[in-house]
Amino acid sequence: MKKALICGVSGQDGAYLAQLLLNKGYSVCGTSRDAQISSFQNLTRLGIREQLKLESMTLTDFRSVLQILAKIQPDEVYNLAGQSSVGLSFGQPVETLESIATGTLNLLEAIRFIGAPIKLYNAGSSECFGNTGDKAADENTPFRPRSPYAVAKATAFWELANYREAYGLFACSGILYNHESPLRPERFVTQKIVAAACRIAQGSQEQLHLGDISVQRDWGWAPEYIEAMYLMLQQEQPEDYVIATGETSKLADFVAETFACLGLDWQEYVTVDSSLLRPTDIAVGRANPGKAKANLGWEAQYKMKDVVRMMVEAKQQELLRK
């Protein structure tokens, strides 16, 4: 039985990954900073909390990382931990850099120190590319990060590349574009839109306040992207991959599609609020996931309109249960 360690198991990706690996017969251990008080509500929601071993681990504490690796002795480690919000990173740049860059470095150094043949997956981000204009970014596109979050993710990416080359570690980064699901918290704009639209459809008189709705992103379905993470660690050689749908849409289109699913005209309910604008933002996110299709046999089946429909259906069911 293969053993997997998921750092950041309580988040959207961590929960879906735990579910996938359990279904594949893995023994799974998940970590959070304090496993005694964490709610792990996403694991509960997926009905898998009791099937995992849960441990406390702080990625910014090298001793903590070393202890857990020695205790669990995993075959595969998935690093999904760290501050995960681009917007929040402007207010918490130090925490963002430490949790992502220092945390990743501690994992790499601990794996090197132990000397066991552990395979490491690291959660990279399309935010690292910055503005690429009309060019679809692939694995060879230069990084031009435009947020503290993106700077931290770019740092972690190059840490992995360095350890892979210098020490022969099996370590790879998935450069993931936006991927959504019902497990997203409402501080992420897609869930904020879906939740507000569903409440309005039920009679709420609120207005939905959004920042720049002209930005363009590649939105995919999170449970599919988890499969790509797993596939990267099953290859003969460690390589980095762009994971995306290859289809880019405006945020305004995401909003319009959400309200249309509920039979509403979005323009009656949305207010553009300048206080929600970020100091710097990416105008267009465009991706070329061709390498993942060629090497991993992975291709996104769900595009933006599918993602919207599935998130709206899940939110409606959740509201009906309340």
Image (cartoon, helix red, strand yellow):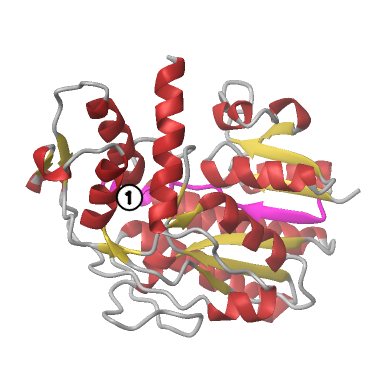
Residue 242 spot, x, y in % from top left: 52, 72
In the picture as drawn, the residue positioned furthest to the front comes out as 263
User: Image check: 275 left or right of 291?
Assistant: left
In the picture as drawn, the residue positioned furthest to the right comes out as 1
User: Image check: 294 left or right of 317?
Assistant: right
Residue 294 spot, x, y in % from top left: 64, 81
**Residue visible at 63% across and 63% down in the picture:** 228
Residue 63 in view:
no
The quadrant in which the C terminus is found is top left
Residue 18 spot, x, y in % from top left: 69, 42
Q: In terms of image quadrants, where is residue 202?
A: top left
**Residue visible at 71% across and 47% down in the picture:** 20
Residue 144 spot, x, y in % from top left: 33, 75
Q: Is residue 53 above or below residue 309?
A: above
**Residue visible at 71% across and 54% down in the picture:** 77
Q: How many marks on residues?
A: 1
Q: Is residue 12 above or below residue 201?
A: below
Residue 51 in view:
yes
Per the image, the residue denoted by label 1 is 89
Q: Is residue 49 on the magenta stretch?
A: no
**Residue visible at 43% across and 41% down in the picture:** 311
Kind of residue at disc 1: Ser
What kind of element bears circle 1?
A: helix
Which range of residues does the magenta coloring cover?
A: 74-94
